[in-house]
């Protein structure tokens, strides 16, 4: 069964069209209000020129009062239209950015991973910065239209005074936009590369933070820092390049706009000197020449923002259009199911075969850490069934034939480095708020001392990634979450590596007691957990080489005794 998304966009341009289509109403109102704002701004110098001409001719206080009232109406219109127009557009922009963040995050968190070829840090950058920049198109289009309205009104007003002034504005605007549209393509390509490099740097620092403790353990932190520095330096150089190109673009736009405004002003002055336009028209022309600097600036910046939005949309399309790494089935396993691994070959695993009967507690002692990681990855569906040889069965059903939701409901593989989220102890243990075994899970995982330390108990606040907890406390919290899920088949990988020996003994007894009658597989080298298991499977060089109870293996297998008691 696939996980179809009938509304999934196929490319960056489709994402932009979807964003525009969903916000037609808000953009229409925003365009009307921003067009009214620009029209009011344009009307101000026109009205001022008419007032000057009318006052010089008639010298009437009544006419002056009407003129002042007209200016007040124009100013009020400008103020209110800008305020409400931008409020509508920014609300639509923020809402649309949120929608795309949810879509990208949802694609990254789907039960069946997508084959995006990106690290989690890169997906995070796409879900935040690129979503925001794509949604900016909601504001760009209305501002573009309203700026065009302002330029056209100015051109018409100047053309009524003298056709040469109107033509100068139109020809100058076309020339400016032609030059800047060519330059904006360079900005688009540079921005795409910058976004990719920044995302890679974000992914690198995320990996570095996650692996900082083990890196310190074997002295690899300096090499990791150097690797991040290289990636970050590349991102910095590309950012400087984008800033340089953007600066040239902005400077060129400002210079061209200033040249056009100066040309309009000088031409109006010459026409007034020759008597072809009157003083009021000259005042209007000078005022419009100064005014059109702002809409021309906005108008000339729009191609740049469009290219940035398109580059971001194309990066989002990398995630949203990526196919799933596997196509799961539709079946469901029976409740209280067993777990069978039949001749699985993947990574360091070489035809691994074993079965955990329903209700049995089995431990796997993996002599090579890589083999433990490969086995956990296969069971956790991190490796598609068609990417390895052999079969994994849950309740007699092939894992490849199970619906993902059914597999996750019956089979839980808890990683040794499970994420801790911002919230409370309770919300980390029971995110859905439906578990009935939270107290027993807390006790079995020996999280009771952490709960007792705080007056709030299970409602004690936990920071992002468990920053206010020790390594052992985070590990026990992750174990409590796995136990509270109370799944038919539970797989634990190294759940006690960060706790002391006494706590480890108590956890082993607690897990065995809580999971009695439920199928449990623990991948571990802990003597306490191995002793608590009904039987132990020895995984060496990618195959199961021995099987017995922990104590019999200690007595009969010298290699096993050396491996688990060192």
Image (spheres, rainbow, N blue to C red):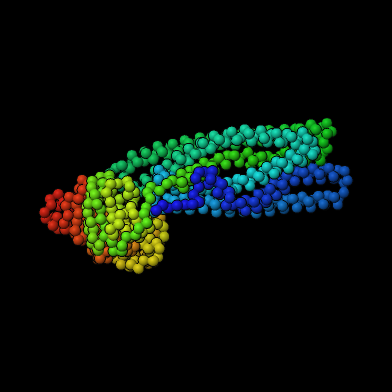
Q: Residue at x 52, y 41 (%)?
A: 311
Q: Position of residue 67 (x, y in %)?
A: 81, 49
Residue 91: percent from left, percent from top: 58, 54
In the image, 527: left or right of 140? left
Numbered disc total:
0
- Residue 470 can be seen, yes or no: no
Q: Is residue 166 left or right of residue 228?
A: right
Please tell me which residue is depicted at 28% across the width and 51% down the height of the picture.
391
Residue at horizontal 72 percent and vertical 52 percent from the top: 77
* Residue at x 68% of width, y 42% of height: 148
Using the image as rendered, state which of residue 304 and residue 476 is in the foreground: 304
- Camera-side residue of 423 and 468: 423
Answer with left or right where residue 396 lies relative to residue 113: left
Which x, y percent locates residue 300? 63, 38
Q: Residue 37 at x, y = what percent?
A: 69, 49
- Whether residue 17 appears in this view of the structure is yes
Residue found farthest to the left: 556
Front one among 434 and 495: 434
């Amino acid at each position: 069964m696939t996980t179809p998304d009938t509304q999934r966009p196929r490319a960056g341009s489709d994402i932009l069209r979807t964003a525009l289509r969903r916000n037609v109403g808000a953009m229409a109102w925003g365009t009307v209000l921003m067009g009214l704002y620009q029209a009011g701004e344009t009307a101000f110098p026109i009205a001022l020129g008419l007032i000057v001409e009318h006052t010089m001719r008639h010298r009437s206080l009544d006419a002056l009062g009407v003129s002042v009232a007209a200016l007040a109406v124009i100013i009020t219109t400008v103020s209110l239209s800008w305020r409400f127009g931008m409020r509508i557009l920014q609300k639509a922009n923020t809402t649309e950015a949120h929608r795309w963040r949810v879509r990208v995050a949802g694609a990254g968190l789907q039960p069946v991973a997508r084959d995006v070829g990106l690290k989690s840090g890169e997906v995070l950058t796409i879900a935040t910065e690129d979503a925001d920049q794509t949604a900016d198109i909601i504001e760009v289009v209305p501002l573009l239209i309203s700026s065009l309205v302002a330029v056209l009104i100015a051109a018409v007003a100047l053309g009524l005074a003298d056709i040469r002034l109107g033509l100068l504005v139109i020809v100058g605007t076309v020339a400016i936009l032609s030059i800047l549209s060519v330059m904006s393509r360079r900005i688009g390509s540079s921005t795409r590369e910058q976004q990719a490099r920044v995302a890679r740097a974000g992914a690198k620092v995320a990996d570095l933070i996650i692996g900082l403790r083990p890196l310190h353990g074997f002295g690899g932190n300096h090499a990791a820092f150097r690797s991040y520095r290289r990636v970050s330096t590349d991102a910095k150089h590309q950012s400087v390049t984008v800033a340089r190109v953007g600066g040239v673009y902005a400077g060129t736009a400002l210079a061209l706009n200033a040249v056009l405004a100066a040309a309009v002003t000088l031409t109006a002055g010459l026409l007034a000197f020759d008597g072809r336009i009157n003083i009021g028209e000259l005042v209007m022309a000078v005022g419009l020449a100064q005014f059109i600097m702002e809409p021309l600036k906005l108008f000339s910046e729009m191609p740049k923002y469009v290219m940035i939005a398109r580059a971001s949309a194309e990066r989002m399309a990398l995630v949203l259009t990526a196919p799933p790494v596997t196509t799961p089935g539709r079946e469901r396993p029976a409740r209280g199911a067993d777990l069978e691994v039949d001749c699985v070959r993947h990574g360091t695993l070489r035809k691994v075969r074993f079965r955990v009967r329903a209700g049995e507690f089995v431990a796997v002692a993996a002599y090579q850490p890589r083999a433990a990681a490969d086995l956990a990855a296969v069971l956790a569906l991190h490796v598609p069934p068609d990417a390895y040889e052999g079969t994994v069965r849950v309740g007699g059903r092939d894992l490849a034939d199970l619906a993902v939701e059914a597999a996750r409901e019956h089979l839980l593989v808890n990683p040794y480095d499970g994420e801790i989220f911002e919230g409370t102890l309770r919300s980390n243990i029971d995110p859905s708020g439906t578990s009935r075994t939270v107290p027993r899970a807390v006790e079995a995982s020996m999280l009771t001392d952490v709960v007792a330390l705080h007056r709030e108990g299970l409602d004690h606040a936990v920071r992002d990634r468990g920053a206010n907890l020790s390594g052992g406390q985070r590990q026990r919290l992750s174990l409590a979450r796995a136990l509270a899920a109370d799944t038919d088949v539970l797989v634990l990988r190294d759940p006690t590596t960060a706790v002391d020996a006494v706590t480890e003994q108590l956890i082993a007894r607690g897990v065995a007691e809580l999971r009695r009658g439920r199928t449990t597989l623990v991948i571990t080298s802990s003597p306490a957990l191995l002793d608590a298991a009904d039987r132990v499977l020895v995984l060496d060089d990618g195959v199961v080489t021995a099987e017995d109870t922990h104590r019999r293996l200690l007595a009969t297998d010298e290699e096993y005794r050396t491996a688990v008691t060192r």
